[in-house]
Image (spheres, rainbow, N blue to C red):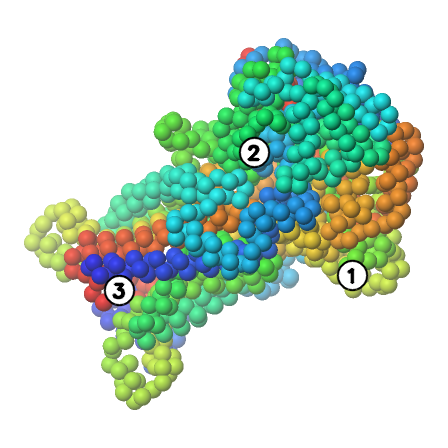
Amino acid sequence: MIAYLLRRLVHTAILSFIIVTVVFMMIHLLPGDPATMILGGEDAQPTQEDIDRVKTELGLDQPVYRQYVTWLGKISRLDFGVSFRNNEPVASTVLLKRLPRSLMLGIPATLLAIAIGVPLGILGARLRRTMWDPIISAVALLGFSVPTFVIGTLLILLFAVRLGWLPAGSFVHPLDDMNGFLKAAALPIVSLALSPLAVIMRMTRSSVLEELGSDYVRTARAKGLAEAPVIVRHVMRNSMLPVITVMGLQFGGLFAGSVIIEFIFNWPGMGRLFLTAIGQRDYPVIQAVVLVVALSFVLINLLTDLSYAFFDPRIRVDRN
Amino acid sequence: MNTISELQQRIQRLSDEQLSRRTLMRRAGLLGISVAGVTTLLTACGGDDDPTAAPAATGTTAGAPDPTATTGADAPTATVEQVAGEPKPGGTLRYGSRGFGLIPPQIDHTISTTLLQLNVYDTLISYDPEGFLAPALAESWETPDELSYVFHIREGVTFHDGAPLTAADVVFSFDRILDEETGATRRPEFARMASYEATDDFTVAVTMQEPYATFLSVLANRAATIVSSAFQGDYDREMNGTGPFTLESFEPDVQYVLVKNPDYWQPGMPYLDRVEVLAIPDDSARIAALRSGDVNFAEYIPSQFVAELDADPNFTVFSGYDIYNYIRINVNREPMTDPLVRQALNYAIDREVVIDLAFVGLGVPMTVGLIPPNDPVWYSQELDGHWSYDPDKALELLAEAGYDDPSELSFTLESSSEPNHLDSAQIIVEQWRAIGISAELQPLESAVRVDKRFSGDYTIMFDGAANPWTDPDFYSLYISSEGPVYAVGIGFSDDEIDRLLEEGRSVADVAARQAIYLELERRLLEVTPFVFINFRPQAEACAANVKGYVRVPGVGSASPQFMEWLWIDDEA
Amino acid sequence: MVGSTNAMEPESSLQAVSAKQRPNAFLDWVRWATRTPRVIASGGFILLLALAALAAPLITIGEPAQIRSGEQHRPPSLEFPLGTDEFGRDIYTRLIYGARITLIVSIVSVAIAAIVGTTLGMLSAHFGSPVDTILMRFADGILAFPGILLALFIIAFLGTSVVNIILVIGFLYIPRFQRVAYATTLSIQENDYIEAYRAIGARTGRILARGVLPNILAPIIVQISLAMGTAILLEAGLSFLGLGPPPSVPSWGRTIQQSSRFMNLSAYGVIWPAVIISATVLAFNILGDALRDRLDPRLRT
């Protein structure tokens, strides 16, 4: 088990290293120049001397491999550097400010998706061959057939603009004003949760169905056990495996969704930071975000795999 | 959602309004009335029940009166007496901003920079609500001869850290702008000074290398801010100005918070206790935030929302035409080397249709050069209507240039992805294609576009801009051989244009200069380095209880720099 | 529930795909498709859309980019069946031409991903360690890689075009197929007939193409159908962020993005493309479900 964990962690490290290296090379090859953006971007017309001077300051006049080596040296000391644009330390911006805000949407959205998706899936399986099953299935299918940005746009139009119940796009820190946070986060969380909810619901339904058809359930039923305990004690537990895989994947995939949701709802999380940083060619910020996203994705995968063992003792993760 | 018939009615009403608006504008142009003034008249009739908003809206003219016509000594101090109602202190303004200012002073980032920079820092000279140059940190000034300026610095002004403002700070600020390390935007203009010195604690004397008619306008520019010589902090992280507000907190690209400077040098101002500026780059999100009350002031209102917000008694809209769209042509790259081709492209576009479709009918076609038609001093009436929609002429010119078959003329128009650009670009490309030209459109990401523009790596590129000052010497920034905005990138150079610009800059007499710039524009139209499109509507909107905003002529959409004039009427 | 109800072994049903082994398979498929309501509905919709896209010039009004000054924001009428957008362009015409883009982008990108991904997946499983470690970590890498950055990168270099968006989506979808192919290949690796191929000394290519591929095709086909739906969503999302095809191409996602700015004046420019995107994705998902039920009874729902 420990050997397995170690091996996975080494893989994680190597993979993240490769991703970050590829990203480093990509953004340095990308047309567009951080120096021009720093010196005013769209509206200004700096001279070549100004640009050269800023490049020297940022170390961008060095050949890419030299920059890469310098950067590796820094990153190995966990020094993410400072933002090109405003000299803010990247680590504190990304990890302390932006990541928590993205999680403030991502975690509730995942919980919401699980809290509604799993019971709905079980319900769908139980109601099989009734008129409700196709209705629930159709709604679930629709849930991930409508683009996220369409849902977001329509929610804003309805709840913020027409009804005026909720703000359209603002960030309130929950420690400052919990009520305000709940209002501000409600629409983005719902938009973000919809697609994973549908996926989780479908997965739950099909794996519960599979379990319901298995021998031990039939035996339990034959013994005259009550339906509810059977579902809770046996079926739930056994059918959670594929559901967990899906949950892990969905949570890992939340970053992609959060870029669009944070853009639409003007939420100052990591997704929006990423878009701005790319637009401004703020290399240290881009790299830090990519590293955080890649690491968390791989770690969540690992956690998912480990949780298999918890839900199904028959599975030993290190069997191969 | 509205019912279909309601929508139909609304669209009908809108197009009626556009029609009358445009007819009126054309007539107004004949009569020499300011175009935007007419718009104001119409918007005022458009159902705005708030009487206090109307006088404020008179500031919607684009193009300013001749700044050289004022002298500092008798120019009025900027006041809001023109605005009806008694300003009340207190309240918080939540401002929805499109772009985002950065902290370092003296670098011009975007138009949104002004809001942050000029509410925390001050310049020597500013504008009054009517758009005339007005004293700011310089209480008054004299011009003993055409090469010299003497500025009398206002006494009793303190920086936010408590240090008093003296002439030494002004000299330090000039030094800082001229220092290459700063990367100051206005360094080339400041480099026209031969010398400057503090003659006493509150007097600065400046001598120019040669007469430079634009100098006072340059001093009023948003990148010509005055900083403290004693300040030892980090200019990237802190701000220490003399302006009406101090910077309380700042999170890049998210929000910054300004709080009232109790020691501000203009008595009684500012009225607001607090200004919270939120970055909301997406147009729809910004409008939604205004509608839902998340913010009570929003900049860059897209034209399709202007009529609607204007008709809503809960909001006040201010609009004008200070920004223009044009296409820069690389005259040194095939197939654009032939001026006939460049002229043909100009005749092949229907500016009215562009305005109708991309800006719901709001906007003014560019029929001459880059000076707005309502500029009373510098607009060349003689050339009015030079560019018109004339596809036959375009085809003739193309034939003359050797393109009997217009489809042989093929090129790609590069544009930003900004809706204000991309909408028009789509329409224009379709119009070129309609007469047979093989035109394609390629949107570019901002950083890529800036790079290409800087290095001149384009055939034709869509762009939008506002003139940094109303003095026509702004043409130097584009088409003089050293023009950083356009000429340098592609290597444009025209001896006659250079000569005329040099001449215009060094003459003080307005009538003589008018003649020179008429000559310059004649040459410009011959050379045709641009496709001239239109002055586009630019609007800000606020909740009806936000008072005191003036869209200053010539300052236009950068007018939120005067936050000290704003106040909130809690009884409204 | 459709299909045969006896407890078929997965392998036997999978072999049903290979028409060689079952001469009647094709007829079986036709019978199944024409008797299953959800296949008729979803498949019919996709077929209709594809036909409309092919016949676009015959059934539409002028060019999709044709701008009509004075006709902007018209409600649906006989002249403009779905109304006009902010530039007076006919929404119906744009949607039909947009269907071409959407279908081409999703079909070609999913095809690329399916071919590359399946090949890599089979190779990983066939060769085992260390090939599988490297190739499967490569798949993890793509999954963990920010797709937006990749899209931006390709666009910054090559410009926005339909081909480039296909490359982006195709690349990003490789791991989906690679994982499925890897898992299913592993599960059939030890089967007798694969052993038989090995015993007669068949080359790797032959083993994979003749022995493995026909037997893992079922889950791949299901995955293709599901990926089509999400590819359409991804294309729309990228277009929404301005990273899709250029504006001259009436892609559905871009249409929504562009028209949503004028939503206060007229909502038709948003509603119709939103409806057609959702309907198309829904159709692919329903078809995917149906195929899965038919091909892979273990996963039958």
Q: Residue beneath label 3, please? A: C298
Helix, strand, or loop for circle 2? loop
**Residue at the (8%, 51%) spot, across then down:** A224
Considering the image in quadrants, where does the C terminus of chain B appear?
top right
Whether residue B565 is visible to the viewer of this picture, yes or no, is yes
Disc 2 packing (10 Å; few <14; some 14–19; many ≥20): some
Query: Alpha-carbon distance for marks 3 and 1?
Result: 64 Å
Residue B430: x and y, percent?
72, 53
Callout 3 and callout 1 share a chain = no
Q: Quadrant of residue B180?
A: top right
The amino acid pointed to by label 1 is Glu
Side of B243 where C48 appears, left or right = left
Side of C140 where B245 appears, left or right = right
The amino acid pointed to by label 3 is Arg
Residue B561: x and y, percent?
64, 26
The amino acid pointed to by label 2 is Tyr
Residue B519: x and y, percent?
91, 41
Residue A126: x and y, percent?
23, 50
Query: Alpha-carbon distance for marks 3 and 2?
Result: 66 Å
Query: Of circles 3 and 1, which is in front?
Result: 1
**Residue at the (48%, 57%) spot, across then down:** A68
Disc 1 packing (10 Å; few <14; some 14–19; many ≥20): few
Q: Residue beneath label 1, please? A: B334
